[in-house]
Image (cartoon, rainbow, N blue to C red):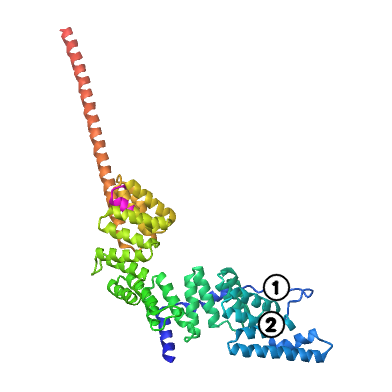
Amino acid sequence: MSTQSNISRTNINSFNNPISHNTHLLQQQLQPQPQPQQSQSQPQPQPQPQPQLQSQLQQQQPNDSLSYKLLSLTVETWLAIGACAESMNDDESAASAYNKVLALVPDNVVASIAIGNLFRGRDLFAKASEYYQRALTIDSKNGDVWGLLGHCFLMLDDLQSAYGAYQQALYHLNNPNAPKLWHGIGILYDRYGSLEYAEEAFVRVLELDPNFEKASEIYFRLGIIYKHQHKLREALECFKYILDNPPIPLTQPDVWFQIGAVLEQQRDYTAAKDAYERVLSVNPNHSKVLQQLGCLYSQNTAEFKDFSKALALLNESLNIDRTDAHTWYHIGRVYMMTNDYSSAYDAFQQAVNLEQRNPTFWCSIGVLYYQMSQFRDALDAYTKAIRLNPYISEVWYDLGTLYETCNNQISDALDAYKHALSLDPSNPHIQKRLEELTQFEERVILMVSMEVLMALMASMALMASMASTVLMEILMEILMAIGISMGAMD
């Protein structure tokens, strides 16, 4: 166990995670504002946990000490029977015993929580939440129960209610550094898509308890988060760490699949191919792995590039699941690479029929039309892609290329390239093309300016020449008039 603890800490530190500085920000975001105190005419419900059972019973039977003692003993006995039945995994007998307690004392907090726990253990989260809320009507400051209620809401996919319950848990717990609580908060943020907060919460669980019972699940979730954040080295570390102990119900091939996906993003195609083939050795009918492996064989920079093999693998995947739009899409791309435009069009059409609102599909259709010199259709496809998602730099780059080709629309092309660069500032290809086109536009403007200037100078010279001719004609007429006058005088 000590070895696992050391590895956990090493991995966390290697992620360069800012949680040690920012944890209080996450807790502050979840922390509710203190509620105003109610007036004396509206007293708050007093918490009545099990240690105060005696006073609760005494209020119900203030004038009969013998009845009170008997009731108290009966309740304690049924609670003990329930706990004993739970220890023997006899949930039915345990629930029966706890219900006997609630029949005697409807406001008993311990029995309500215990029944809630039984339902939660059977994944009956709606029923469990009812009993936890029942307990909280009596003891509204029980942070542990708020945490359990938050987990139930989370499993019911009621994220807003889960958020509120976790707020209350953090507010009322004396020590909020509970690994299970932060595990739930991490899943909540993951469901919301707030990956940075989810990462922070999961890493905090491992810092609080490196041997947490669901540590392998947390490493898997962190691996997925890092993959989406393009922190590929950290993602690979997470997946490799749990390779020999994957979280239930996942298996080792599931982890190999994720490792292959990360290696593919790192453009280590040979290692990615090996990872995918490990999955196929266990499950040869894994449609997604066949799909990804087919894509690898179509990569131009892969040493093992083979379009025929790519199509064979993709069609094998398609035979297993013909409703996967992405398989049709990748088949279309391979056909486009082999200049089989008719087959590419048919495959892309199948893809968009299954998933009409995928901008990547429409972008590739635009590229296909461009290669077929159907520029108007290409423009329509790019426009469709941008309407679906205006934040994909590749679409804007392809649109710029189209504008350059179509009627030499340099100004429109520059605008498209600038938009692409704003979305992907570190892309060298966009930077280079934008610089080249900007310089070309400057040269064109200079050439046009020179042509205009030369034309203007020629016009001025012509005007000067014409003015000189007129002037000479006038002088000649004057001289002739003078000559005639002198002859008359003679």
Q: Which mark is residue 99?
A: 2
Query: Image quadrant for the C terminus?
Result: top left
Query: Image quadrant for the N terminus?
Result: bottom left
Q: Which residues are magenta?
A: 366-374
Label 2 residue SS: helix
Looking at the image, residue 273 sits to the left or right of residue 58; the answer is left
| Residue 421, quarter of the rendered image | bottom left
Looking at the image, residue 223 sits to the left or right of residue 74; the answer is left
Kind of residue at badge 2: Asn
Residue 371 highlighted magenta (yes or no): yes
| Residue 332, quarter of the rendered image | bottom left
Looking at the image, residue 388 sits to the left or right of residue 377; the answer is right
The residue closer to the viewer here, 135 or 487, is 135
- Against 152, is 436 above or below? above
The residue closer to the viewer here, 246 or 249, is 249
Disc 1 crowd rating (10 Å Cα; few below 14, some 14-19, many 20+) is few
- Against 366, is 218 above or below? below
- Against 16, is 384 above or below? above
Kind of residue at badge 1: Pro
Q: CA distance from mark 1 to mark 2?
A: 35 Å
Q: Position of residue 352 (x, y in %)?
A: 39, 56
Looking at the image, residue 228 sits to the left or right of residue 189; the answer is left
Q: Position of residue 211 (x, y in %)?
A: 47, 87
Cβ atoms at labels 1 and 2 below 8 Å apart: no
Task: Please state which of the two labelled residues, at mark 1 or mark 2, is closer to the viewer.
Answer: 2
- Against 143, is 267 above or below? above
Q: Is residue 35 something one can see in this rendering?
A: yes
Q: Which mark is residue 36?
A: 1
Q: Which numbered disc flags the more N-terminal residue, 1 or 2?
A: 1
Q: Which mark is residue 403?
A: none
Label 1 residue SS: loop
Report the residue at 35% width, 58% height from top. Answer: 394
